[in-house]
Amino acid sequence: MIGRSSEWSEPTRAGKVKRSKRASDIAGFEAFCLSDSPYEDSELAPPAAEAILAKSLEKQSTAEGSLRVGIAADHGGFELKEVLSAALRRSGVEILDLGAFSMNLGDDYPDFVIPLATAVASGQISRGVALCGSGVGASIAANKIAGARAGLIHDLFSARQGVEDDDMNIICLGGRVTRPALALDLVEAFLAARFSGMERHKRRLAKIKAIEDHQPC
């Protein structure tokens, strides 16, 4: 568990030294990490979060046309998939549901995640949300498809930075380890983020593409 540093929590007695923005950001991040849910002890309920999501995606949808997001899950992520799909639809996001369509404890995540990753890589959908019990299997399966760049995400920084730096196009979440309120926040950050296009990031992605194309890096 992250402990709070005294140098962040209290100003000096003289009051002449203010907390830096970075210290403030870190303190806020600590508070987020110490909370089971970003909505605990807050007036911000999930319906309000959906409104925030809709607002954050409004500019993207206008610029790029209707945002089309695919979502897929096995039995381990099925319940979270249903919650996220409903929330995203209420926020105006077009959802392509690739299953599972019912709870089946005997189903297998590759049967749902591979079609999702294929649709993202081919450009049929803009982004993907892949779910299983832990998110690990979903990320392994999705990354077998050339052009799919999937990341297993547990925090808001990675949800945004994975897109900005690594052009992540599929977010993987664990239905058994991520609460719905946090999952919605992570998907919001993922969908609102943009690849920076900076040269160093393009260079690194080109090396990954070379591996996919069976070419020397």
Image (cartoon, grey):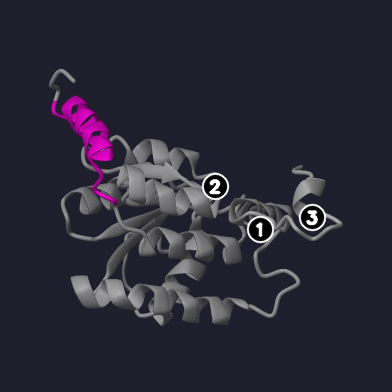
Q: Position of residue 109 (x, y in %)?
A: 41, 45
The numbered mark at residue 28 is 1
Q: Residue at x 21, y 48 (%)?
A: 121
Spatial distance from mark 1 to mark 3, Cα to Cα? Answer: 11 Å
Q: Is residue 134 left or right of residue 16?
A: left
User: Callout 3: 10 Å neighbours few (<14), some, many (20+)?
Assistant: few
| Of the image marks 1 and 2, the number of the one nearer the N terminus | 1
Spatial distance from mark 2 to mark 3, Cα to Cα? Answer: 37 Å
Query: Magenta stretch: residue 198 in it?
Result: yes
Q: Is residue 173 left or right of residue 199?
A: right
Residue 131 seen anywhere in this rendered image of the structure? no
Q: Is residue 112 left or right of residue 203?
A: right
The numbered mark at residue 9 is 3
What segment carries the magenta color? Answer: 196-213
Q: Nearer the viewer, mark 2 or mark 3?
A: 3
What element does badge 3 sit on? helix
Please name whichever residue, 191 or 95, is drawn nearer the observer in this view of the structure: 191
